[in-house]
Image (spheres, grey):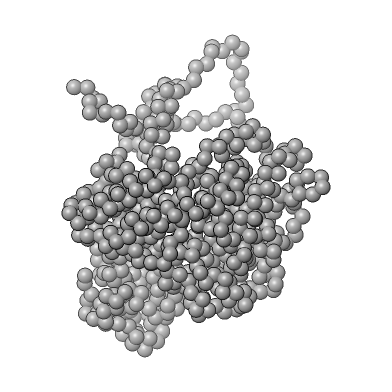
Amino acid sequence: MDFPEELKYTEEHEWVMIEDDVITVGITDFAQDQLGDVVFVELPEEGDELEAGKSFGVVESVKAVSDVYAPVSGEVVEVNDELPDEPELLNNSPYEDGWMIRIKVADTSDLDGLMDAEAYQEFIEKE
Amino acid sequence: MSGTEGRGLVLDEKLLFEQSQPGRVGYSLTGLDVPEAQPDSRLVRKEITDFPELSEIDVVRHYTRLSTWNYGVDSGFYPLGSCTMKYNPKVNEVAARLPGFADIHPQTPEALNQGALELMYNLQQDLAEISGFPAVTLQPAAGAQGEFVGILMIRAWHEANGRKPTKVIIPDTAHGTNPASAALCGYDVVTVASDGLLSKDAVAAVMDNDVAALMVTNPNTLGLFESDIREICDLVHERGGLVYADGANLNALMGISRPGDLGIDVMHFNLHKTFSTPHGGGGPGSGPVGVAEKLIPFMPKPIVIKDEEGYKLDYERPESIGRVKSFYGHFSIMVRAYTYILAMGGEGLRRATEMAVLNANYVRARLEGEYDLPYKQRSLHEVVFSEAALANDCHTLDVAKRLIDYGYHPPTIYFPLVVRGALMIEPTESESMQILDEFCDALLAIAEEAKTAPEKLRMAPVRAKVRRLDEATAARKPKLRWEREDA
């Protein structure tokens, strides 16, 4: 399983790519592997305000339905419009084509609590 | 060589549309012996195109063949966890077909349908006695609607008390319908992690005055009795909340423990689970709801009452949440459930519960060791294994598909979500020890195959009408209607 060094990770199994005050969010390789084949993705709209820890979308696989949680508070500035039509991107390319949303972060210090790749791998081993 | 060589008697079947022959009909009318008349043009139906044209025997064979593809509890063991696929005794069908029940019109005046009303009244009373609630409505069409009705009553009670709490607490072992019902009633769902069992402390940590209700299934979907339930109910009540019980698993309690005595305020029954009425596509279901004293004013109307003149439908209920189902609910299902209760009697219902629990524990005892049992507390009517002990990276889905080759409907899989690769087995009281042994032998043989011949699991099923289907593509790109190829 692949956990790119340049990304940050959450306990809810999302990855976060930080570019100044805009972050890109998706689900990790571990998450897509646990879910199995993803068949449905629901995303927020551009302009939606997200609150840290609250659900911003839904991922449904052949096994289960899971909420996806906002890692930090902020405004949705872009969503991956291809995902609802091609949910398999989450399985095939979780870190690239399967990105979910971009968020303009309200307070960048909120990002300090995220895990790096090594800490995340330790976290999933414990789970 | 004939075009049908090799077809055998597998009764493969084309769609009626594909069998259609222009001009073939299933009726035969005598010649017209009166003058032809032209009806009003507004009454003439526009032509229907592309309807299948078939003879009577074509249609009879079509549906008879399709019926042979069914798997039901009448054709074999059906250990679908959380669904209580118990045998549906044929005496239920005899009662439901009595002309006085089967042919009654729902708008018959009360004076002429006293027998039907009496049956409904008696069923309300019996369910009340079994559950420990003072009143029961029979209206909801099935379990999920029962939940919805229960939460609506809870909301009405809070509003009558001048409160508007916004949250419902639900443990992570819950059926998916629980959060859906709460959300439909406008509540935010707070999920509580349980460690197999819901602890008092876990509830206390999220409990505040803004909580409308706790929704709990007891025994929970791991088949475990929520032993803190009394204290948890007290805790919720102290902060002004109510407790909803999902009665899906009543088959583990019936005749032994009464949810109404445990401090629970409202609970739905699944007549199609616990009370042996048909299930799934063969239903319909029925989801009566029992309530504590304080919720009686809010029950759906009408309910059946009895006074000196006889049985009647009571509509004089000003605080009622209203009607939730056309007419009075699924009456013929009530007839079946009432028949079951009478046929079993109190002792018989208790015995059914004991046998259901014994059977689940027998399966557990035979499989534990070969299959991983993540929660080791005492099981009631069902047992949940994980995929952790399967060799060679075999998964729960592979076991389920391989069970088809061994002649069994697979159990519930990947639920509850708190177990990785859950395999949820509920044998019910209907099965004999011989059947349970054969089933356990099959599962043990499959666990052995996972070690020695894992490809047998990955290839399965090989002895079914179709091989392993591509569920992901079916869900991603569903084809929801047939289209003519040349169109």
Point out the residue furthest to the bottom here: A109
> Residue B55 location in percent, x, y?
43, 22
Seen at 27% across and 82% down, the residue is A119
- Is residue B467 in sight in this rendering? no
Query: Taking A113 as reference, is B150 left or right?
Result: right
In the rendered image, which quarter is residue B2 located in? top left
Q: Is residue B141 above or below residue A90?
A: above
Nearer the observer, B388 or B211: B388
- Is residue B15 in sight in this rendering? yes
Quarter the C terminus of chain A occupies: bottom left
Query: Taking B412 as reference, is B9 left or right?
Result: left
> Residue B475 location in percent, x, y?
35, 53
In the rendered image, which quarter is residue B157 located in? bottom right
Q: Is residue B204 above or below residue B422?
A: below
In the rendered image, which quarter is residue A68 located in? bottom left
> Residue B155 location in percent, x, y?
63, 67
Q: Is residue A119 above or below residue B36?
A: below
Nearer the observer, B288 or B262: B262
Query: Taking B146 as reference, is A114 left or right?
Result: left
